[in-house]
Image: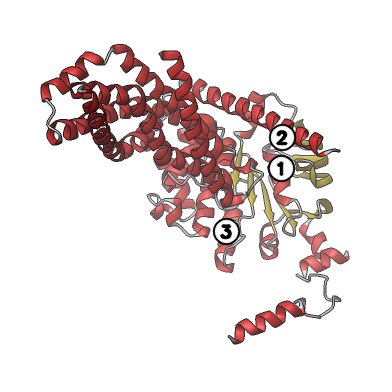
Amino acid sequence: MEKWDIEFSHLDAGYGARPVLRDVSAVLPAGKISVILGESGSGKSTLLKHIIGLFRPMGGVVRIGGEDIFSLNSAKFRRLRRRMGVLFQDGALLGALNLAENVALPLSEHLDLPQILLREAALRVLAMVGLEDFAGYYPNQLSGGMRKRAGLARAIVAEPRILLCDEPTSGLDPVTAARMDELLLDMHARYPEMTIVVVSHDLAGFRAVAEHVLVIRDGGLIFNGSPEDLVNSRETYLRQFLERRSGDSGQSLQRPMNPVVRSALAKWLAS
Amino acid sequence: MTKFSALFAASGRWAISAVFAVGDTTLFMFAGLARIFSGVAIFSRALRQLYIIGYKSLFVILLIGIFCGMVLGLQGYYTLVKFGSVGLLGSAVSLSLVRELGPVLTAIMLTGRAGSSMAAEIGVMRITDQIDALDVMDINPMAYLVSPRLLASMISFPLLTAVFDVVGIVGGYLTGVLMLNINEGAYFYRIASSITMADLAGGFAKALVFGLLVTTVCCHQGYNTHRRRDSVGPEAVGSATTSAVVISCVLILAADYALTSFLL
């Protein structure tokens, strides 16, 4: 096992007593882009939050470089997490800080260096994601795509060994989503040693960036392998997922509205 | 289960959750206080909070203070005139302000103006993953969000209380001396002779305690927005803000009673 491999072993996870993930076992290889695919609510983001250590699992273990992250003492766990960068769904930028301050935050809070140097470091990373002209803008002055790019800049400013991205392209138009995928590939080229984990339900994005794929359905792992194997899979659900079919085509075409509600609605529309 | 035992069980559950909430909030306050001296960056963040809690609340405190003093002057005059003691108006106005109304009304106004925005701001940060993001960046959210606010409150509550007291005394002067023509010298002589150092210290001690209570409750409610059972998402931020203001106001009055009993 390599130093920055991420491994789940018989992972059970959930919120309170409600289980979300059941018996998930897989390895996300170091230095590769792994994409975790699945429908909304399947448990992808929950899996990501367990890698970050925001939640403790109900059972099983999460190992990074062979070490169970939940058995580490607080100091060791913090040291490990310093090597992770996380892009949250909407960027999670601090609203009171401008982009340069947001991106510099992981450095300015921990390094005793002049502000001008830290700002310059932030501007370099902002330039990498194409936002150097927006350094003085606040998050609420930016579009969703720009917030995500700024979130990515903040996640990589400390050059982490593990980059975790929670739905980096959700809610973006196809062009902006493609730009985000290009950024991830660019990141991978610049930092080939970085383990990148992307949680997504964006099929175009997965085809563009994935080197390893997990597919989760209803909290269980149903595919673990290469993108080629996934594309060639004959498994019914995976075919439906890849071909964007719901699998509900045999359902009745009867309209669902109650006749009483329909008649009242008709009266209101006619009034 | 009989109705009586169901009622008994429900009140037991309520009592247990109330004790848990008090314990949790107290630990939250100590965690925030303990991190005040964890780094110099906290002081620069506290400076920004001083501007938000202190400076931005100054105008409303001046306004409330002057009207409160004017009402006290009017009420005091018409009460004291029945006993032929209008000369004591200065004592009545200043003692009421310094011992009770100054700290209490300042704290209630600051709860509405600054406490509610603390709860809402931290609540929004919680539901938009900003607090998780701080945690992931190895930035302690308590040290980043709560400690500077506690420090700023401990400074600004007593200072704004002092402003309220002075402006209130001026308000009493406007109605008592300028409108109702009591003797100016008697008004100020009574103030100087009746206010003791113990009164001032008691008033400031109350302001300090109220500042700690309000900030702790408001930050705690915002910080735990995601744990609310009555609502989720943006609605939970609204509920957390309402709870923060209501709990703070009740605690201010309860603590005022306890402190007054202790100080008298």
B98 left or right of B210 in image: left
Label 3 sits on residue: A180
Q: Which residue is depicted at the point 76% across and 36% down?
A: B7
Q: Which mark is first along the chain, 3 or 1?
A: 1
Is B14 rendered above or below residue B262? below
Q: CA distance from mark 2 to mark 1?
A: 7 Å
- Looking at the image, do the residues carrying marks 2 and 1 touch, with CB atoms under 8 Å apart? yes
Colouring used for the render: secondary structure
- Looking at the image, do the residues carrying marks 3 and 2 touch, with CB atoms under 8 Å apart? no
Name which residue type carries label 3: Met
Residue A112 visible in this rendered orientation of the protein:
no
Label 1 sits on residue: A30
SS at badge 1: loop
What percent of the width, then of the height, locates residue B42? 43, 28
Give residue A53's quadrant in the image: top right
What percent of the width, then of the height, locates residue B180? 15, 34
Give residue B179's quadrant in the image: top left
Q: Which mark is first along the chain, 2 or 3?
A: 2
> For the residues carrying marks 3 and 2, which lies nearer the camera in this image?
3
Is B115 rendered above or below residue B103? below
Q: Name the residue nearer the viewer: A152 or B205.
A: B205
Q: For the residue carrying disc 2, how many other residues have a C-alpha within 10 Å: few (<14), some (14-19), or many (20+)? A: few
Chain letter of disc 2 in the image: A
Chain letter of disc 3 in the image: A
B108 left or right of A198 in image: left
> For the residues carrying marks 1 and 3, which lies nearer the camera in this image?
3
SS at badge 3: helix
What percent of the width, then of the height, locates residue A5? 73, 40
Q: CA distance from mark 3 to mark 2?
A: 27 Å
